[in-house]
């Protein structure tokens, strides 16, 4: 008879039944570990092998133009990357880009979500149209803005400027970083609207009616009821958007290629430039590790921010 087989009489007998249950549970846990271990090992290899290779390349002089020179240089690549003038420009552009997009998407996301949360004819169609830009690929989004909207000759903005007798603006030459901010904000605004609009569905309507009966106006209701209710989803929007905005690349590559000069070069494009334009894999690997460290620091503080918001909410 199999020792793992458990009879009804064993269960009724007390200790023997309890030991049989524990034995089956341990055996099932052991089998589960065996079944899960291949996927865990594959996941670890998928993460650790690229990271290990990046660390290795960052510690050697590895330029694709000079494949035979692979001597160990220690932290020299990190020092050169941080002290180069392009790093200061890339870092400031990254912070300005992320901060501006977050400000635009959160402020407009809250206002638009409050408006479309009201009942009006065609609200469903309006909601679908507001969310649709988020599903457009970043490269297509950048091409639409570059060739159809911001083009100084044939763009929509140029036609509007000409109609009112003004000189069309060459956006990517005169205001390159502002143009990138507009493009990225247009794509990420629907994400903020989607989360905030969903959060507004759980806002207590009876509480709002009671506030109106007590004489509270729309502004008072917004600042004392709606905005506190959106504190948690706003924190989530800020956290998720920040993580993705730190790696913005396609919009810059498609429109300005980081220029003019370093005007639109962020950390992601700077690493690409070092690796595939200057062929310095060692320097680019060092920059990639620095970017990973900065992203993890930002994620740490943002997770604490969201956790604090959740604690206060509960």
Image (cartoon, grey):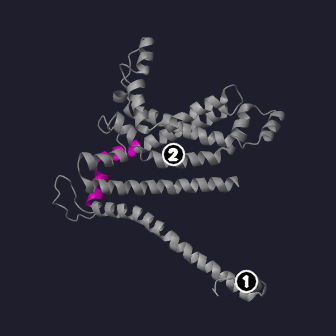
Determine the main secondary structure of the stretch shown in magenta: helix
Residue drawn at 78 percent across, 34 percent down: 216
155 or 106: nearer the eye? 155
169 or 25: nearer the eye? 25
Residue 184 against residue 167 in the figure, above or below? below
Q: CA distance from mark 1 to mark 2?
A: 56 Å
* x then y, percent, for residue 114: 66, 34
Q: Verify whether residue 84 appears in magenta.
A: yes
**Left or right: where 83 falls relative to 303:** left
Q: How many marks?
A: 2
Seen as rendered, the residue at the extreme front is 1
Residue drawn at 44 percent across, 38 percent down: 137
**Left or right: where 23 falls relative to 145:** right
Which marked residue is nearer to the observer: mark 1 or mark 2? 1
* x then y, percent, for residue 200: 68, 40
Q: Magenta residues, as a range?
A: 76-93
Q: Which mark is residue 280?
A: none
Q: Verify whether residue 62 appears in magenta.
A: no
* x then y, percent, for residue 188: 51, 39
Quadrant position of the C terminus in the picture = bottom right
Residue drawn at 60 percent across, 76 percent down: 28
Q: Disc 1 marks which residue?
A: 7
**Left or right: where 56 falls relative to 9:** left
Q: Which mark is residue 241?
A: 2
Q: In the structure shown, which secondary structural element does the residue marked by tag 1 occupy?
A: loop
Task: Kindly indicate the quadrant of the structure image that contains residue 292.
Answer: bottom left
């Amino acid at each position: 008879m199999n020792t793992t087989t458990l009879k009804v009489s064993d269960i009724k007998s007390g200790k023997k039944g309890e030991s049989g249950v524990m034995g089956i549970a341990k055996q099932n846990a052991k089998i589960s570990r065996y079944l899960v271990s291949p996927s865990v090992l594959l996941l670890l290899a998928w993460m650790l092998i690229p990271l290990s290779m990046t660390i290795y390349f960052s510690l050697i002089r590895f330029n694709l133009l000079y494949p035979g020179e692979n001597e160990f240089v220690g932290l020299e690549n990190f020092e050169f990357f941080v002290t180069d003038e392009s790093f200061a420009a890339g870092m400031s552009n990254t912070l300005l880009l992320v901060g501006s997009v977050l400000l635009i998407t959160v402020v407009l996301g809250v206002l638009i979500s409050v408006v479309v949360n009201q009942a009006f004819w065609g609200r469903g169609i309006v909601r679908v149209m507001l969310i649709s830009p988020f599903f457009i690929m970043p490269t297509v989004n950048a091409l639409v803005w570059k060739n159809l909207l911001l083009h100084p000759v044939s763009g929509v903005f140029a036609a509007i400027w000409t109609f009112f007798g003004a000189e069309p603006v060459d956006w990517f030459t005169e205001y390159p970083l502002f143009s990138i901010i507009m493009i990225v904000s247009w794509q990420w605004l629907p994400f903020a609207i989607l989360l905030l609009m969903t959060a507004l569905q759980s806002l207590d309507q009876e509480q709002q009616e009671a506030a109106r009966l007590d004489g509270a106006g729309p502004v008072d209701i917004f600042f004392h009821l709606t905005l506190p209710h959106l504190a948690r989803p706003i924190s989530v929007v800020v956290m998720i958007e920040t993580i993705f905005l730190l790696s913005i690349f396609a919009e810059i590559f498609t429109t300005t290629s980081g220029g003019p000069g370093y005007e639109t070069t962020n950390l992601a494009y700077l690493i690409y430039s070092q690796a595939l334009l200057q062929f310095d894999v060692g320097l680019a690997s060092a920059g990639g590790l620095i970017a990973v460290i900065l992203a993890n620091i930002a994620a740490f503080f943002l997770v604490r921010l969201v956790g604090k918001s959740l604690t206060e909410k509960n």
